[in-house]
Amino acid sequence: MTFFELTDDLPAASVAVPFLKARQRELLLDIGEECTLGEVAQFLETGAGHPDLTDGFNTPVRRAQLKQSMDWFDRVGKAWVGKQRRDPRFNWVVPRNSTGRRIDQIMANGVDRKVRRLERLSDTPGPSSISDLHDLRVLKRMRKVLLAGESVNTWLRFLSVEGANVIEKMRSADRTLLMTMMAKGSRRLLATSCHGPWEPTFPRAYRALPISWLYQFEPSPRAIAVTNDLLRVGCSNVGHLFVLSPGAWSILKATKSSDWLLFRKTLHGV
């Protein structure tokens, strides 16, 4: 099943966030499985549909908000399917031209070359700058950690410096909340639980789903706050949550966002 075949049959609550007010969110959650996104689209086009939709979205403003949510959901999903998965507003760690290359190949030019240069400087008689010694320590440590890391070739391309900062500060309880939502969502779609897109049984088509789709499975203010934090740093789709995989989480929690910034600048030759 493709993303486009999937969406029409999703519950209307899939677009409960991020643009609707609390009362309209509750309405979509209460409708449950009775109304699908396909029916929401028909309602917006014709004005006729499920009675709860016609009652709850009975003003131009409310209908406009619902349409905004629908349009955003569609746009974010299509961007993923079209391989536009890295919003240019953010500082993605891995360069754009590195798609399909392994982490050792990506680091060969920028990081490895700078490490060798800094090592030569540190071996040269005379004082080395504190900045050079700091950069050398950071880059050598990150090189070692990433080469030994789990599934680095997959999750690193979905990491921005801004995202690293958010995940560094994220509470374990918030990661657990996201994984719980993904498990409930996958059980709804697949009749089996997957805690994230990194699990082999999680279908590739479902990675395109906007992360706002998760809200319906644990609707709470905290769920909105956590997903909004991720949206603000370019993690707009379920597939972006590869950065919460066990291997990624352990590295990101142990690495400062300033170290990721240095690593990115080195990879990009800045």
Image (cartoon, grey):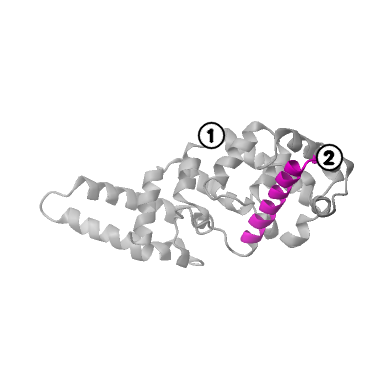
Estimate the spatial distance between the alpha carbons at disc 2 and disc 1, rounded to whole Å: 32 Å
Q: In which quarter of the image is residue 184?
A: top right
Q: Residue furthest front?
A: 60
Amino acid at circle 1 = Arg
Density class for disc 1 (Cα within 10 Å; few <14, some 14-19, many ≥20) is few
SS at mark 1? loop
Residue 68's x, y, as percent?
69, 49
Amino acid at circle 2 = Ile
Question: Residue 73 colored magenta?
Answer: yes
Tell me if I can see residue 200 in this picture: no
Q: Mark 1 points at which residue?
A: 171
Residue drawn 76% across and 35% down? 26
Residue drawn 74% across and 61% down? 4
Q: Is residue 233 above or below residue 123?
A: above
Residue 31 circle label: 2
Residue 266 circle label: none
Density class for disc 2 (Cα within 10 Å; few <14, some 14-19, many ≥20) is some
Of badges 2 and 1, the one in the foreground is 2
13 or 22: which is nearer to us?
22
Q: In this view, does 23 lie above or below 164?
A: above
Q: Is residue 270 above or below residue 214?
A: below
**Secondary structure mostly seen in the magenta stretch:** helix
The reply, left or right, for residue 224 in relation to residue 37 is: left
* The N terminus sits in image quarter: bottom right
Residue drawn 50% across and 59% down? 153
The reply, left or right, for residue 199 in relation to residue 193 is: left
Compare marks 2 and 1 and give the one earlier in the sequence: 2
Q: What stretch is highlighted in magenta?
A: 57-80
Residue drawn 76% across and 46% down? 187
Residue 252's x, y, as percent?
47, 44
* The C terminus sits in image quarter: bottom left
75 or 191: which is nearer to us?
75
